[in-house]
Image (spheres, grey):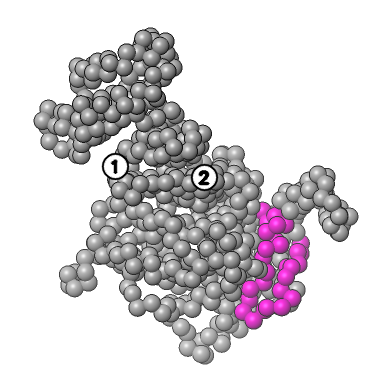
Amino acid sequence: MVRLITHNLLACHVKGCTSNNFPLEFKDVQLVPHESWGILRYRTKLPRCLDDDFLKTLHHVLLEIHVEEGIMICPNCKHNYPISNGIPNMLLAEHEIG
Amino acid sequence: MPAFLFVFAQSHSEFRLPELESVAELHGFAISVPPDCDTSRPFMVLNLESEEHVRVLASRCILIKHVYEFYAQGGNYDELHVANKASSHMWSSYVHDTPFKFAVTAYNHKISESRQRNIVESFSYMGFLGKIDMKNPQIILGCFEEYDSATGLREDRDGKFRQVYFGRLVVDGSARALIKMFDVKKRLYYGNTSMESEVSLLMANQALASPSRLIYDPFCGTGSMAYRSPTAYFGAQVFGSDIDGRQMRGKGGKDKPPGVLRAAKQYGVADRIVDLCTFDVTRNPWRCGSLFDAIITDPPYGVRAGAKRLGRKKELSDKKKAANIEHQISARNTQQPYVPPTKPYELSLLAADLVVLARYLLKPNGRLVFFLPTVNEQYEEVDIQSMLCDGMVLVANSLQDFGSWGRRLVTIRKTTHESYPPPSFEEEHPSDHVPAHKDFREQYFRGFKKESEVQ
């Protein structure tokens, strides 16, 4: 699924890649549900008080929006982590574990 | 505090107390267990603050069959009746007109009907005036004889019980029904290492699974532990990872949802599975620690499936290594999905690493719950003690006995509030102690004989 809450917990872990390795950039993603990007754009700042509407939106963003297919790219070392069938492949290649 | 008679299921005796204590902790109360309490016996008299606590325990503890308000016990019926008369203030209010029923049973024995009748009649001094109602009694009075063993002739054994208990039924254990509900055979998706339901329910209780708690399984495989499963059923949100993504996906290809999710849907818990990831836990992408309330896992111990970590069994020569790396980099984009080389992950190293990893990833007071196979003859307590590190304290350690080997369900709590750096997973461990679970796979296939005996 790769919900956004998961995306928020994953960083690039290639050996030596320790700065600017988070957040991973999404590329070529298939999002479920598709129309969700709008919400991500218009809610950029945390409001002062957390009202029910906001919490619902937050829940929607973190837990209901998920990525089925696509790639996550490290902004620093450009490693590609493919997402297939909703399961991200975070395995490293032999030369990346040092 | 009122006393209650707990009647436990006969299996998993070592799990009885840890389970009670965990469920009590989850609901914010404590149970005081007398120091001389013998947990191998299926009857236990415990003092609890209220009947409400009893109901909580009975609704969640898998091993509770019934709980009775405790009236009396004795080595023979004379002792029992004396004690019961002394407790008359507890039952006198039912004397007048309460429809009631007697249940007389025994552990390790079967009491003949005629003797059952005699036993019931021996309680006639209680003078119950209400109707005897076998179908809809308002109260059930239970009398239990406890025999030490079921060996020998029934006639010889009859009446030579160790202890007899008497009380009024408060509540039947309702959690036992979950064992059937989570039966592996009824699942839409399972694998050859899926764990039987009773044990996975026990694990969920040890992990204090409940709503709003985040639980992680680093060797999730087909997900029997975390996903389809009791843990999510009890309301926890679950993450899973495994070095091999194939088990999580199952058959069905691109168009079908992963097998784990299909099974989770069956139990209505699909939305409690936060995510599944493929990675080697020794090279994990978690960007910070103190994330999870519990880590719950059944690490592969090599008999049906072996643990793996990234790396090679034999290091390549420098020249080959360079050529290999060049090949990997150039081929990277066309050769999807990439499958890196793996090497076996020896169980005692894995177990020790798991504790250090848990200290990093758990929140303070979080719990690590996992199964460790061990050779019974060689097991020593220090095997578990030597795995611990600063800030990690053993809560429970119960054996599921299979004869020459067994599985220990180990529960460890993170007591420290300090934050630790992510573990390095170096292969060397400073401890000189060789635990009984080291090279478990090799020992298993040797039939648990010493190496010298085999030759």
- The location of residue B251, given as percent across then percent down, is 54, 50
Q: Secondary structure at mark 1?
A: loop
| Quadrant assignment for the N terminus of chain B | top left
Judged left or right of residue B296, residue B44 is left
- The location of residue B73, given as percent across then percent down, is 28, 32
Does A26 lie within the magenta span? yes
Instruction: Tell me which chain the residue with mark 2 is part of.
Output: B
- Amino acid at circle 2: Phe
Mark 2 lies on residue: B29
Callouts 1 and 2 close, C-beta under 8 Å? no
- The location of residue B119, given as percent across then percent down, is 23, 20
**Residue at position x 71%, y 78% from top?**
A19
Which of these two is toward me, B45 or B424?
B45
Residue B181 position (above or below residue B342): above
* Mark 2 Cα-neighbour bin, 10 Å: few <14, some 14–19, many ≥20: few
- For the record, the magenta segment spans A1-28
| Quadrant assignment for the C terminus of chain B | bottom left
Which numbered disc, 1 or 2, marks the residue closer to the eye?
A: 2
